[in-house]
Image (cartoon, grey):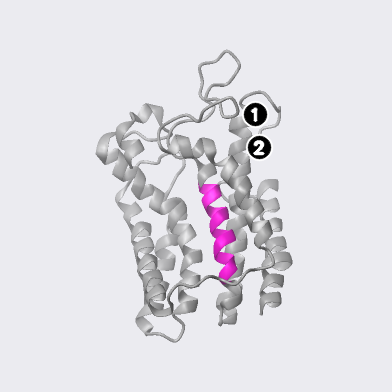
Amino acid sequence: MVTYARLPPNQLYHTSVGGLRGGFGRALVDLNFPIALIALGLLAVALNALLGWRRIVYAAALVAVPMCALTAFVVHQKDLDAKPINAVPALGVAVIATLTALAVWREGLAPTPRAPGDPLRVAFACVLALLAVPWLFAATGFYAPGPIYADEVPRGEHLAAVHLGHHHGLDGVLFALAGLALSRALPSFRHRLLTAFASIVLALSLAYGLANAFQDFEVEQLWKRGTVGWKAPSVLLPSLSWGWLAILAATAAIELGWFRRERRTRA
């Protein structure tokens, strides 16, 4: 909100409204993508803690899912200005936040037992943290320091390799971290259908996040600088492409070869 309020729209990506209105509007859109979709994984964890509770909880969850899923139809990469419809997924996030607070109130907070895949989780998280450096700086309205993350393309062009503001690469990092963290709760799930749904969603979140983080980093830090000649295609939106075939294959591998085996081991 602060970055988009203080910087002129022409320095940002596909926005046209500046000042406080632009800042609050961009924050609202950010609650749609990626937050509303990431919140679906958190909803599954909250529901596991609230199983057998009041029917109003399940009614709220059934309402929150389509509200958050509406993100796929109301957020467009080429027009990131806020619209009234963007308030609907944001309200879905508020519902899930409320259910999460109820789950914490009912079950409390306790450390999750160590999982066999935790070393791999830590390794993925460290790599993602390094990839996210230029995007974290850009999100606060600054360029990351060089020479590794220099802001200009070394071709004699006055063109920033990394635009200021929010990046879909950072969204990818958030999706991947959500998949890594929330999947640690899967062995404690008590409902078979909820477990299967949550595990697939979190495996997809991890695969989708890794793919988008890699794609954005490769384009900005390698292709734009002439280090490599191949430009990674966008995988932000579902499509009939090799990139999405790889994401679905990775999702299946993560679910069957990692999350499911981990659940059985810890059980």
Q: Which residue is found at the position 72% from the left and 61% from the top?
A: 253
Tell me, yes or no, whether the highlighted magenta stretch contains residue 181: yes
Secondary structure, mark 1, is: helix
The label on residue 232 is 2
Dot label at residue 223: 1
Picture residue at 60% right of the left edge, 18% below the top: 154
| Residue 63 drawn at (x, y percent) | 38, 70
Residue placed most toward the observer, 162 or 236? 162
Q: Residue furthest bottom?
A: 52
Q: Quadrant of the N terminus?
A: top left
Residue at horizontal 71%, vertical 57%? 249
Residue furthest top in the image:
156
Quarter-of-image position of residue 169: top right
From which residue to which does the magenta span run? 171-185
Q: Identify residue type, mark 2.
A: Ala
Q: Residues within 10 Å of mark 2 (few under 14, many from 20)?
A: some
Q: Is residue 223 left or right of residue 135?
A: right
**What's the CA distance linking mark 1 and mark 2?**
8 Å
Is residue 241 visible in the rendered image? The answer is no
Residue type at mark 1: give it: Trp
Question: CB under 8 Å between callouts 1 and 2?
Answer: yes
Badge number at residue 83: none
| Above/below status of 71 relative to 261 | above
